[in-house]
Image (cartoon, helix red, strand yellow):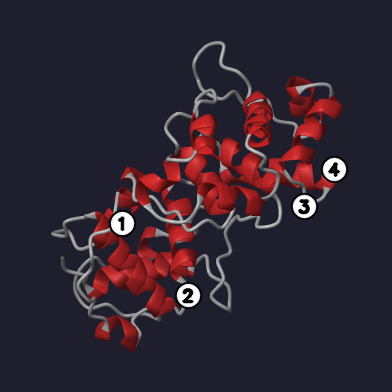
Amino acid sequence: MMITTNSVARLAQRCGEFLGDFGQAMTPSYPSSLALCILDAIYSTGSHPTAVDNIVARYIARHGSSDGAKSLRYSIAAAGGADVWAREVICNLKPASTRPGAVLKAEVVDSAVRVMADHGIDDVGDLREAVGEGVGSIAFSSDVSKGWRALPSQSSGITWLHLLMLAGSTHFEVDHKVVGYLAEVADPAADLTVDYVHAEIDAVARVLDAEVPTVERIVWQASHGRILSQLKDEDLLPVSGPVEGPETSSAVWEFCPEPLVSRPV
């Protein structure tokens, strides 16, 4: 495994775009509202980030920014059901899939909050406790995960992993989207294993003086299209050759990853 200065600098440049002055990720997360986590997670697939932001903003305008899953369920019930809620509260009638007759995503949201109720989950803390901490397949082993992935068009687990990232969980899945994103910045000869991806992210966290979970959330959301870069091709650092720019701090050039113990997948 070879971590090159160019690949670290290029990934640091992309991740740095979404960091604030104090190393905090300027990306969606809702540590005080499971309702917002659920909305963002379910609507994030197949939608432009602005559309998802608008849905979240409309819900906040109506109910505030600290609702749990139970309050989200009450919101849908008070509106008269998922269809009316979709029209009048969040103003979005997007279906859960492109298949003919697919249910609205609002109906999936309604079913999702029922899954949470079935497992005694109301807030973010409840969710994280039910899922536990760890990496890899542990994220899918809980009963609540199985209930979520049984919902219409949610079997892939992508929205489930979105939900965990939005809730501040430590779960970070190196799926094909993440690998593809790293492939754009990695050395062309790199073997993009799970360990390689984690080593790149660890290196970038050091360069940017940020927490590893912060960089993981940026990589996850960027690779899955939840956040969009404003960088143009001509702004990106080169794949090979001398690297010049603010990302080429001494930390980049001095970085030498220690041998990694294989992580569970």
Q: Amino acid at mark 1?
A: Leu
Q: Is residue 234 above or below residue 194?
A: below
Q: Is residue 128 above or below residue 78?
A: below
Label 2 or label 3, whichever comes before in sequence order: 3
Residue 236 position in % (x across, y down) = 36, 65
Q: Residues within 10 Å of mark 1 (few under 14, many from 20)?
A: many
The residue at which mark 1 appears reads as 182
Q: Is residue 40 left or right of residue 180?
A: right
In the rendering, which numbered label is found on residue 210? 2
What is the count of numbered marks? 4
Q: Amino acid at mark 4?
A: Arg
Tag 2, which secondary structure? Answer: loop
Tag 1, which secondary structure? Answer: helix
The residue at which mark 3 appears reads as 65
Label 1 or label 2, whichever comes before in sequence order: 1
In the rendering, which numbered label is found on residue 89? none
Instruction: Report how far apart the C-alphas of labels 1 and 4 lie in the structure.
Output: 39 Å
Of the 4 image quadrants, the one containing the N terminus is: bottom left
The residue at which mark 4 appears reads as 62
Q: Nearer the viewer, residue 222 or 32?
A: 32
Q: Residue at x 29, y 53 (%)?
A: 264
